[in-house]
Amino acid sequence: MTTPFLSLTWTDHVTGRCGFLVVDRLVRGVSSGGLRMRPGCTLDEVAGLARGMTMKEALHYDPEGRYVPLGGAKGGIDCDPRDPAAYGVLVRYLRAMRPYIESVWTTGEDLGLTQDLVDRAAAEAGLVSTVQAVYPLLDDETAARRRLAEAFAVEVDGIGLDELVGGCGVAESVLTALDRAGLPYAGTRVAVQGLGTMGGATARFLARAGLSVVAVADIKGTIANPDGLDVEALLAARDAYGTVDRSVLRPEDREEAGDAWLAAEAEVLVPAAVSYAIDSADQALITARLIVEAANMPVLPEAEELLAARGVTVLPDVVVNSGTNAWWWWTLFGDIGPAADEAFAHTRRSMRALVDLMLARAAADGTTPRAAAHAIVAERLPVIAERYGWYR
C-alpha cells in the first residue's frame, strides 16, 4: 500500500477535539471525499476511507464521459455531532482546512453531517464552496455550479435528490445481485442498519421495487415486522440523525434490541450506518445470504472471511455506495442534467454495469466481490495516471 499524498491531524484550540485529513491520491491536482463527524473517529479510519475513495473514483472511470475521476481523500472529526459544541468545532475545522479545500480537496456530507450543515459551516469559515478545488477543471464553471445547485434543490416525495441517489445506487446493487442469482424481488426480505441519508433512501427504493423491509435499526434499537414495515411512515418520522419517532409504529411492529437487525430473518442485510459494525462474533448471528455495504467499511476483514467460508456474499462499499460521489461529478461536469429521472436512470445504468462487472470478475477469478473490485481498480489506476499524469 502506497503512502498517502497528505496526512494530517488537527487539534481544536477551543475544545481539544481532533480532526483529520488524508489525501490519498491526486488526479489532475484534485481529490474527492466526504467529511464525517463521529465520536472515536481516528486517523487510521480516515486513511482507509481515503483509499476507498481513490477506488470509488477509479471504478467510475469512463473514457467517453465528461466526468474525469479525481483522486481519493477523506476528512474526519472526533466529535459527537449531537454535542452542542459540534457546530463550532466543524466551523473551526473547515477554517483550518481552508487552504486544502480551496486547492486540492473537494468534500461534502458524510456520516454524522448533512450537506446543509456542511455548506452553512463552510460559508462561515470563508469558503466559496466545499467543491471549489474542482472549478478550474470545468469547461463552464457558472453553468456547472448552477446545474449542481438546481439538482440539490430537487425533492422527490419529501426527500432531496442528493440523499436519494446514493440509496438508488445501493438498491440497484441489491437488485443486480438478485437478478444474477435468479431470485425474485417479491418475497425477498431486507434488514437495514441505519435510517439516515443512505439507509433511508435504500429502504425506500427496495420497498418500491417490491422487496419487504422487515427490520431497520437506529440509535434507539431495532424496529421489526416479519410481514414488512411501512417504510414511508418511518422515513416521515425521522429526525435529522435518522432516529425514528416510535409513536408512528403500528401495533404489529416490534421494538427489539439494537443488534437484532443482524439476526433478522432476511435474505439481504444492508449495514448503512457506522464503520466496523460487523465483527467476527457478529457475523455468526447473520442468516442473510447477501450483505450489501451501504456504509463505509462496515464488515471487518476477519468477519468477511468467515462469512465467505459459509457462502455469504458481501458486496463491498467501494462499489455499492459510490453512487452519491459519482452523481455530484456527473452533474457538475455535465454528463447529466439536474432532473431526478435523469439522475436515477444514469445511476441505475452505471451501478448495474459496475456490479455486473465486479460479480462476473469474481466468478471468473474464483475470488470475492471485494477482491474483484480491487483487481478492476488496479487495472484502471495506471490507465488514469497515464492519461492525466502520475500526480500523487
Image: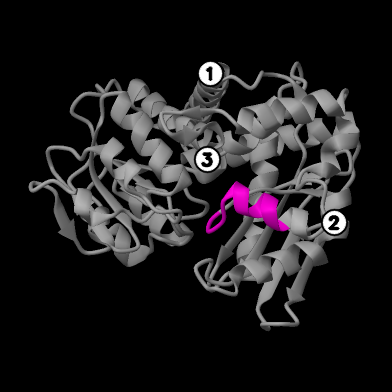
Viewer-proximal residue among 56 and 213: 213
Q: Which colour scheme is used?
A: one colour
Q: Is residue 348 above or below residue 86?
A: above
Of residues 175 and 197, which is closer to you in this image?
197
| Figure quadrant of the N terminus | bottom right
What percent of the width, then of the height, locates residue 366? 46, 35
* Location of residue 202 with respect to 295 vertically, above or below: above
Q: Give the range drawn in magenta.
A: 111-121
Q: In 3D space, how far apart are the residues under numbered discs 2 and 1 (Cα atoms)?
A: 33 Å
Task: Give the number of callouts.
Answer: 3
Q: Are marks 1 and 3 in contact (CB under 8 Å)?
A: no
- Residue under numbered circle 3: 321
Residue nearer the viewer, 21 or 114: 114
Which SS does the magenta portion mostly show? helix
Q: How crowded is mark 3: few (under 14 residues within 10 Å), some or many (20 or more)?
A: many
Up-down: is 380 above or below 279?
A: above
Q: Of label 1 and label 3, which has the lower sequence position?
A: 3
Decide: is 9 above or below 262: below
Badge 2 or badge 1: first in the primary sequence: 2
Residue located 65% across and 63% down the image: 76
Amino acid type at circle 3 is Asn
| Amino acid type, residue under disc 1 in the picture | Arg
The x and y percentages for residue 181 are 32, 25
Is residue 362 in sight in this rendering? no
Residue drawn at x 53%, y 18% as measured from the top left: 349
- Which disc number belongs to residue 100? 2
The residues tagged by marks 1 and 3 sit, at their Cα atoms, a distance apart of 15 Å
Q: Is residue 166 left or right of residue 78?
A: left
Per the rendering, the mark at residue 349 is: 1
* Residue 323 belongs to magenta span: no
Disc 2 and disc 1 in contact, CB within 8 angstroms: no
